[in-house]
Image (cartoon, helix red, strand yellow):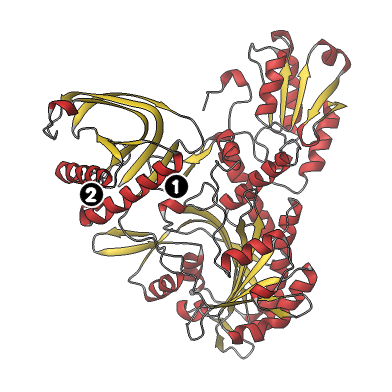
Amino acid sequence: MRALYIHADFMEFEAKKKTPVAEEIPEQMHDGRMEEALVAFITVESVDEESPEEVCAQAVDDILQTAKRVGAERIMLYPYAHLSNDLSSPKAATTMMKAMEDSIASQGMEVARAPFGWYKAFNIRCKGHPLSELSRDFSGKPIKEERKAEGSFLILTPEGEEFAVGDFQGGSECFREMVDKEALKKESVSISEEPKYLRLCRKFGIQWEAMSDVGHMAFTPAGALMFDLVADYSTDIVNDLGLPIYMVKGTNMFSLDEEPVREHAELFGDRLYQVKTGNKTFVMRYAACHQQFAMMKNWNISYRQLPFGAFEVADSYRLEQSGETMLCFRTRRLNMPDLHVVCKDMPEAQQNFSVLDERIMDEMAVLGREYDLLINLSSQKAYEENKEMILDLLRKHGRPALLHFYPEGTNYYWTINIEYHILDQMKRAREIGTVQIDVGNAHRFGITYANKEAEKEHPIILHTAVIGTIERYLYTLLDTAVMMESEGKVGHLPVWITPEQVRLLPVTDGHVDKAKELADALEMSGIRVGIDDTDATVGKKVRRAKQDWCSYVAVIGDKEVESGNLKVYYRNENRDIEMDVAGLGERIAIETRGKPFRKMYMPREMSRRVDF
């Protein structure tokens, strides 16, 4: 069942004409109006017929909770077949809508229901506050916790001291939030307003795709360009690690009939995204592991070639609960820049683990942010074997770590797994980067290398996403920008990823040719340039360029044409700078050195652009 909630000043409808599947209704149901109502547009899906009571109960509970949260005085249920293309039978839909109406009424809430199967006219006025438009997806199944075994926790300092989680008072705000959430199981303070980064998602065209499954994203040109630049950047980072790298491409679904796939899936947890075709069930990959391991088992590898890395920006799938999805951060389809480093033994694995850890920390520092560490350990033995390496990392970073010991006796494929957390603008600890030591999958998938004696051995494999998923890196960029704003600064993005690095603003039509000439010169230097050649006033053009977060903005008028000098507004420093076009190009080249470049994903001239 899918639902769209709108908190409305009023909602009114009129049943106009029956369809072949229309329910018979009394005269009073032909029209209706409600003031101060939570309107729930409901689509009943075919899968709901398997457990209709459970789905209805889950939906009713959420509707009532939402009504209470937004202060709605009444509830209107409105059948709406346009939220899914997998509809239930008309009889099942009508029965479930009636059951929901009766259940809500039995709990003392005023409720009305529009009739099913009628062509209806309706008029609604949405209140427009941050919680006035919400979407939901109900399965009737209880929400399962992520497969993170309880185990036990302690805190380890760089000095090697161990503390019970309740006895340690130090660490950053992020660290304390992480301890509260992970170890002490304290609920974070509820956020009643819209997260501020979502405003920037809308600005750059990063959004949910309503015509797909829950948790799938879509990107209009600005967002698509940012996405691809981050993917390019993740690839550049991997190629800069000093390792031989094998770039691969693979499929995203694997048969659960294959024993290694099934075993690995069982260890992953409860959030498997599955597809059934015929009599086979396939698991959608949740990282690049399956494809890379399926390839590696057929490679002839010598100890002389180790260590090496295999890399893919892999479309990956995790069946997150619909109520938990969060744009850019928690999605059902994500893109993992997944690197696997194949090492001949544990000392080599630990050495490369430390290299990856340092790069992960450095990449976040580039954005002016800091990580805190949650270190998951498969056993006490794994802790003892890796303790010196862990302490080296903590001493290097100068900060404590939260250690999470998984229950003994479970056959995890990894021994140590570090999650790197930032504190976001909402004061939540958010995992971005990861690295782990895998001792099981080489055995499971049959990956071997020939040692000095030409005997086959199973390597140790490191898994890492240095900057996290593409989506989470974008989340970090946007979150960093809104944190700047909260500190009274002008929010901005790094110049290399700003969709439109320079915008030129010709004063009149007579200055457009000069703007195009300057744009051509900048583009030759590998710079994304837009021209506002519309008939708007200069003031409006300036405001629009700033609203679009262009890094550099320059007005082109008679003075600029004659002198060749530009007065350029630089967003990242919120000031004007005098320079010529060559100086502007040199400045941007310095700022973007070593970063990927792509041309703009929309027309250069604003007069040719459509509105999104």
Choose between 413 and 303: the one closer to the eye. 413
Left or right: 587 in relation to 88: right
Residue for point 68% across, 16% down? 540
**Residue ranking furthest to the bottom:** 453
Q: Nearer the viewer, mark 2 or mark 1?
A: 2
* Amino acid type, callout 2: Ser
* Callout 2–callout 1 Cβ contact below 8 Å: no
Q: Name the residue rendered at 32%, 54% in the picture.
A: 139
In the image, residue 239 sits, relative to residue 86, either above or below, namely below
Extreme front residue here? 108
Q: Amino acid at mark 1?
A: His
Numbered circles on residues, count: 2
For residue 418, side relative to residue 219 (left or right): right
Q: Which residue is mark 1?
A: 216
Per the image, label 2 sits on a secondary structure element best described as: helix
Residue bearing the label numbered 2: 46
Specify whether residue 240 is in view: no
Question: Alpha carbon of mark 2 to alpha carbon of mark 1: how far?
Answer: 20 Å
Residue 181 falls left or right of residue 392: left
Residue 158 image offset from top left, x and y in percent = 77, 75
Q: Is residue 449 above or below residue 246?
A: below
Q: Which image quarter: residue 262?
A: bottom left
